[in-house]
Amino acid sequence: MNHARTDARPARTRHGGSSRFGRPGHPGGHSRHRTTVQGEFALPRTVTPALPAVETFAALDMPDRLLAALTSQGLTVPFPIQGATLPNSLAGRDVLGRGRTGSGKTLAFGLALLARTAGQRAEPRQPLALVLVPTRELAQQVTDALTPYARAVRLRLTTVVGGMSLGRQAGALRGGAEVVVATPGRLRDLVERGDCRLDQVAITVLDEADQMTDMGFMPQVTALLDQTRPGGQRMLFSATLDRNVDLLVRRYLTDPVVHSVDPSAGAVTTMEHHVLHVHGADKQAATTEIAARDGRVIMFLDTKHAVDQLTTHLLSSGVRAAALHGGKSQPQRTRTLARFRTGHVSVLVATNVAARGIHVDDLDLVVNVDPPTDHKDYLHRGGRTARAGESGSVVTLVTPKQRRDMARLMATAGITPTTTQVRSGEEALNRITGARTPSGVPVVITAPEAERSDRGGAARGRRRGPGVRRAPVRRPAA
């Protein structure tokens, strides 16, 4: 394979030429795929036979420097979705991949993108490859995962997301970047400013496409895709595939290789699902005892206000907790995640902003303090644990009024949970979650993530170094 070429599309040219919305004999873009029912919607049936999966990275036709970088990272055997899709994506085929979070999707598309872009140099403002993701956190995670491999093949990679300096990102694009990882809104802004053109983008990846459509990004995504090079390679990866994603598949993917790893419900054998029936008056006490467990935990709530309230309560109870939601500035969110990953904070209290794009090693418990209202939200919240074959548990606290809705949600997700009646202080809660009585000695977080972004930064604490310190009880600010 000539890795310097990204316009070679054997699957398309062998059909006698193609256009973005149809081929000879296939009038209209929306009718060019034969389909077979699988999962949430009718997946396209591969017309051109897929190449066989590989069992080692060494068996792939990739640049030597990329293979050496994988070896230096201790990676020799690909995850199933990588072994199945890489032979085809390296050959220029479009890919439709479904796999639960933690299944290895980032390297599945990232290695192909880097291998096929290697050896090229982007002109100012004209990237050659694009990865679109729904959230800032996922953009940073993708960037972190691909950076060592991009360096190995001497490709410049830049991240374009909201909440960070627009001028700095525009400068990086003006300086030239072969690969751009972006959220749709910020990339649209840079394109409209003239700081970025997409007509040289020959490889485009949509990661977590279902969340992009759920968040209302469909118009922005399609507008951006329409500006990329006609006939370019497209790869779409998602944990779930619904009918909104179907529209993207039918419009932008040609003769894709379809691969699904793990059921869409994500109910793998390494993950336990528990529904804990609690009385409303006892819910906060049970939540506090779970948070005081020995080990990290992510707790999900519905609103920013509820997240802030629970975080304040946990800190006053002696639990090292931090809040993560859309009301925090991007630097605050980044620092909070860093401290959670390193263990300086043991409880991350979050809205759905943390449901995707956050990878934390050895996280074995996710708690839905507020049950999600959609089964996809449940799957993606739960996907923060039991990643890459590790074990983990998802616990949902359910009051009597929520039981019927929760039973319906679990049935839709295809999950049969273990249901237990629990109370704070009882053995069952400890056995399932590791709950224990908190110290009661208030914790004061002294790092910058304790700053209150919802007050415009008016009351920002001085940086006193990493870690936490114990302090006398303080009344919350009015």
Image (cartoon, rainbow, N blue to C red):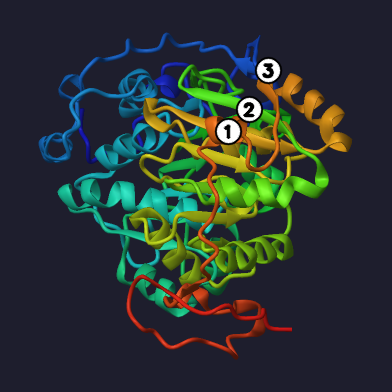
Looking at the image, do the residues carrying marks 2 and 1 touch, with CB atoms under 8 Å apart? yes
Disc number lying in front (1 or 3): 1
Name the image quarter holding the N terminus. top left
Q: Circle 3 sits in a helix, a strand or a loop, which is it?
A: loop
In the image, 93 versus 13, the foreground residue is: 93
Q: Circle 1 sits in a helix, a strand or a loop, which is it?
A: strand
Name the image quarter holding the C terminus. bottom right
The answer to whether residue 87 is left or right of residue 363 is left
The answer to whether residue 299 is left or right of residue 198 is right
Choose top left, top right, bottom left or bottom right for residue 381: top right
Residue visible at 33% across and 73% down?
Answer: 466
Q: Amino acid at mark 1?
A: Val
In the image, 473 versus 55, the foreground residue is: 473
Which residue position is annotated with label 2?
A: 274
Alpha carbon distance from label 1 to label 3: 15 Å
Q: Position of residue 158 (x, y in %)?
A: 36, 61
